[in-house]
């Protein structure tokens, strides 16, 4: 117990502390007491604490002071000792009185609760905990004061460092949302404690395959579905499943799609995280519904041979493999046929050759002719045009010696001379690929040799023939030799043409059409044939225009798996390099369309794009790869640049060198894009070369090449892809476009 000074005044009791010494008159037995005064008049004391009051007694005639008697008006709130010591017992207001004789005085006393001890530390238990996705765990926060005493009744707030992984409610219950780690923090009165929560995937306990039994014909497919499940039988999503067949000779499986190979039974197994499930698939033979013979009509000279091919087919017209075929001739005196369909001309006339399989038949008509004169000689072979990787030839077609147009074997060699034979190569790529079938005697014929190296001189020679090469061909005399030099390859990229190399499309629009590409345009945009600017060796380009004062598009569209590219995969970027090369010219006035290449008051929102690669005809930041554009006010004075199509995630700009402050209108832009989506890793990379200089080569980003669930196929927009707030029309000339799975132009393969 201790006595302390008054700390604060109590306004509540100040007005009521008005008791004053009482004068009892001359009849008071304690005649000598003049007055009693308490100090202080108002005071505050804590519950359990004490306070010293004092009383002064004034006596008359210098008499010694009388004794003082102390009382309280509410002993439940505070007591007072005979010496004036007040002790607080409960919060509230009261009076303490001092009296002597008939005189007295009062003090107003307020009793208050003591302030609670502040929180000095917070600990969370358990400090580390692991929980599976979908599960919960309760954390407990313990609050202590500076002396280590546990405190109760204090407010606590809870927070998670990563709500995508784990959330926490107001009572410390943590709910696991996704695989990862999160720090859970408990805070009270500015003090915090944490616990680390690790969220793991629910393990796969079993795998079910549906349907459990299935039947499929050889050559057809059936789809199986694997469902990984947890120990409670709940389906688990996002788990890797591998498929296997017990007998690849009967059926194969890929991604759950079972392809029947041959009659028999096979077990298809799906495995996920060491757990497996299986289905039994029965493969039946598809019956032959028809037989086609190719060619359906043919001619062969007496003494020569002709190979016919029989193709058994099912009811839907799909070819069937491994079926027995028998061959017969309607007139063995004119043409004989072997068991493999090899027809031998015997004498002039016509015979029907029939192929039969499983009771179904097809036939071909074969005309047998006597030997004719030698095919004619081409004497005007010439090089009509060249590019960096191709040469276009022109010649006049000749008679094959029987009054029908000849076919042609075209060969080439490097250098300005050519000697037919071992040092020559038969053309294997392009429309000049051997054999070249004739069309009309005397017609002017052009064809193109693809896959040549840049800056190289080549010599070409051809020979006209009739019949089948390496079988019964009859040749004429060799043509003249024509030579030409290809243009310089942009950046030295490979030309392709080797095993496994695929060219999805390649066009320089020489015939004035968009070829395998489509036109994507709206709000007045349009694309037409033009001769203003052309690629070497081409007669035309495609001029795309977007009018002023609008937001529109006028671009060439390469939509994989759709339109002119319906026969190519919808997304050739999956687990392989996909290269795209475009050459284009920005027409004079392109910079004026956006008010110049620097930001100013006339172009606060103006921009245009020359490329966009997305899945399906979608808007901005939805899915896909990159866009190439210029927006002086939105992206800075950097000229044309490329940035991820998902710019809301990564808006970094990769500037094309030398395009600021001048866009070099009227000159050729040569751009190569390399796309590669790694399905196992769930990420993609993009590399870009502009006029031979690499401007971008990204790491593997999850959002790069994402389809965002689209199954509509990858598409490229090139040209006047988009104009926003255009001040004048935007015109772009598309000169050349190609897409391959091998390096082209300046592009190099992924590391």
Image: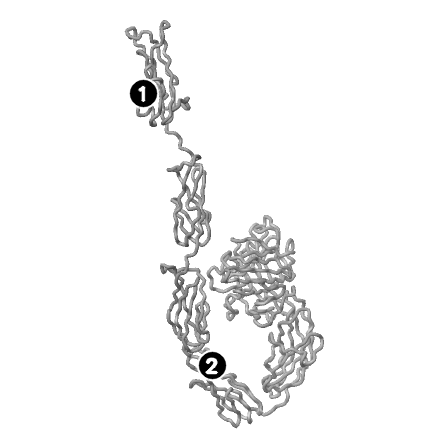
**Is 662 rendered above or below residue 30?**
below
Give the mark count: 2
Element at label 2:
loop
Say if mark 1 contacts mark 2, CB within 8 Å.
no
**Is 374 rendered above or below residue 30?**
below
Element at label 1:
strand
Closer to the camera in the image, 183 or 464: 183
The image shows residue 310 at horizontal and vertical percentages of 49, 83
Q: Quadrant of residue 414?
A: bottom right
**Is 116 rendered above or below residue 527?**
above
Location of the C terminus (image quadrant) = bottom right
Mark 1, Cα crowd under 10 Å, few <14 / some 14-19 / many 20+, is many
> In the displayed structure, does residue 465 sit left or right of residue 518?
right
Say which residue appears at 46% left-offset and 49% top-offset: 182
Closer to the camera in the image, 430 or 149: 149
The image shows residue 437 at horizontal and vertical percentages of 59, 81
Q: Is residue 10 visible?
A: no
* Furthest-bottom residue in this view: 333
Q: Nearer the viewer, mark 1 or mark 2?
A: 1
The image shows residue 474 at horizontal and vertical percentages of 62, 87
Mark nearer the N terminus (1 vs 2): 1
Say which residue appears at 39% left-offset and 63% top-offset: 206
Whole-angstrom CA distance, mark 1 to mark 2, is 117 Å
Q: Is residue 487 visible?
A: yes
Q: Which mark is residue 490?
A: none
Mark 2, Cα crowd under 10 Å, few <14 / some 14-19 / many 20+, is few
* Furthest-right residue in this view: 416
> In the displayed structure, does residue 128 sit left or right of residue 693?
left
* Furthest-top residue in this view: 61
Closer to the camera in the image, 720 or 207: 207
Q: Circle 1 is placed at which residue position?
A: 72
Q: Circle 2 is placed at which residue position?
A: 322
């Amino acid at each position: 117990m201790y006595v302390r000074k008054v700390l604060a005044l109590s306004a509540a009791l100040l007005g009521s502390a008005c008791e004053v010494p009482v004068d009892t008159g001359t009849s008071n037995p304690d005649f000598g007491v003049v007055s009693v005064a308490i100090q202080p008049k108002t005071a505050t004391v804590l519950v359990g604490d004490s306070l010293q009051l004092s009383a002064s007694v004034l006596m008359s005639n210098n008499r010694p002071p009388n004794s003082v008697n102390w009382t309280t008006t509410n002993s439940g709130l505070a007591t007072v000792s005979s010496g004036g010591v007040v002790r607080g017992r409960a919060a509230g207001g009261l009076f303490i009185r001092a009296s002597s004789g008939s005189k007295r005085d009062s003090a107003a006393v307020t009793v208050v609760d003591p302030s609670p001890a502040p929180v000095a530390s917070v600990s969370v238990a358990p400090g580390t905990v692991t929980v599976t996705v979908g599960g919960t765990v309760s954390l407990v926060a313990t609050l202590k004061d500076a002396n280590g005493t546990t405190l109760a009744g204090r407010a606590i707030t809870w927070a998670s460092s990563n709500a995508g992984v784990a959330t926490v409610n107001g009572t410390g219950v943590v709910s696991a949302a996704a695989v990862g780690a999160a720090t859970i923090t408990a805070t009270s009165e500015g003090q915090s404690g944490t616990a680390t929560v690790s969220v793991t995937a629910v393990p796969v306990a079993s795998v079910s395959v549906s349907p459990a039994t299935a039947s499929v014909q050889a050559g057809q497919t059936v789809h199986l579905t694997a469902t990984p499940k947890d120990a409670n039988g709940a389906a688990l999503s996002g788990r890797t499943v591998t498929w296997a067949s017990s007998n690849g000779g009967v059926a194969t499986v890929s991604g759950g799609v079972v392809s029947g190979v041959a009659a028999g039974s096979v077990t298809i197994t799906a495995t996920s995280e060491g757990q497996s499930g299986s289905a039994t698939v029965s493969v039946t033979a598809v019956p032959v519904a028809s037989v086609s013979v190719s060619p359906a009509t043919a001619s062969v000279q007496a003494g020569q041979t002709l190979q016919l091919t029989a193709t058994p087919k099912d009811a839907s017209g799909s070819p069937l493999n491994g079926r027995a075929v028998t061959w017969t001739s309607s007139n063995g005196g004119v043409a004989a046929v072997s068991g493999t369909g090899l027809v031998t001309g015997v004498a002039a006339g016509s015979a029907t050759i029939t192929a039969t399989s499983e009771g179904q038949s097809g036939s071909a008509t074969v005309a047998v002719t006597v030997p004719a004169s030698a095919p004619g000689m081409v004497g005007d072979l010439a090089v009509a045009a060249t590019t960096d990787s191709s040469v276009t030839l022109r010649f006049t077609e000749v008679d094959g010696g029987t009054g029908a147009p000849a076919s042609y074997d075209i060969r080439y060699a490097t250098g300005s001379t050519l000697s037919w034979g071992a040092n020559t190569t038969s053309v294997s790529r392009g429309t000049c690929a051997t054999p070249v079938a004739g069309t009309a005697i005397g017609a002017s014929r052009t064809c193109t040799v693809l896959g040549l190296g840049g800056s190289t001189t080549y010599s070409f020679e051809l020979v006209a023939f009739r019949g089948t090469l390496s079988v019964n061909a009859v040749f004429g005399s060799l043509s003249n030799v024509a030579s030409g030099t290809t243009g310089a390859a942009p950046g030295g990229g490979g030309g392709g043409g080797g095993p496994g190399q695929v060219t999805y499309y390649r066009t320089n629009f020489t015939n004035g059409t968009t070829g395998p590409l489509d036109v994507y345009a709206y709000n007045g945009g349009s694309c037409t044939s033009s001769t203003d600017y052309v690629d070497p060796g081409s007669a035309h380009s495609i001029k795309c225009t977007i009018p002023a004062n609008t937001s529109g598009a006028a671009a060439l569209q390469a939509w994989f798996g759709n339109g002119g590219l319906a026969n190519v995969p919808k997304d050739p970027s999956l687990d392989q390099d996909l290269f795209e090369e475009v050459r284009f010219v920005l027409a004079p006035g392109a910079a004026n369309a956006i008010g110049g290449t620097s930001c100013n008051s006339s172009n606060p929102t103006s921009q245009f794009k020359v490329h966009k690669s997305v899945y399906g005809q979608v808007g901005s930041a939805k899915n896909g790869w990159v866009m190439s554009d210029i927006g002086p006010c939105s992206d800075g004075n950097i000229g044309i640049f490329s940035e991820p199509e998902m710019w809301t995630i990564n808006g970094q700009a990769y500037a094309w060198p030398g395009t600021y402050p001048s866009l070099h209108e009227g000159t050729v832009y040569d751009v190569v894009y390399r796309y590669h989506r790694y399905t196992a890793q769930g990420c993609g990379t993009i590399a870009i070369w502009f006029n031979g200089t690499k401007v971008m080569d990204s790491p593997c980003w999850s959002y790069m090449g994402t389809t965002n669930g689209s199954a509509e196929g990858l598409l490229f927009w090139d040209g006047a892809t988009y104009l926003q707030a255009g001040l004048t029309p935007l015109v772009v000339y598309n000169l050349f476009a190609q897409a391959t799975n091998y390096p082209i132009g300046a592009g190099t393969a992924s590391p």
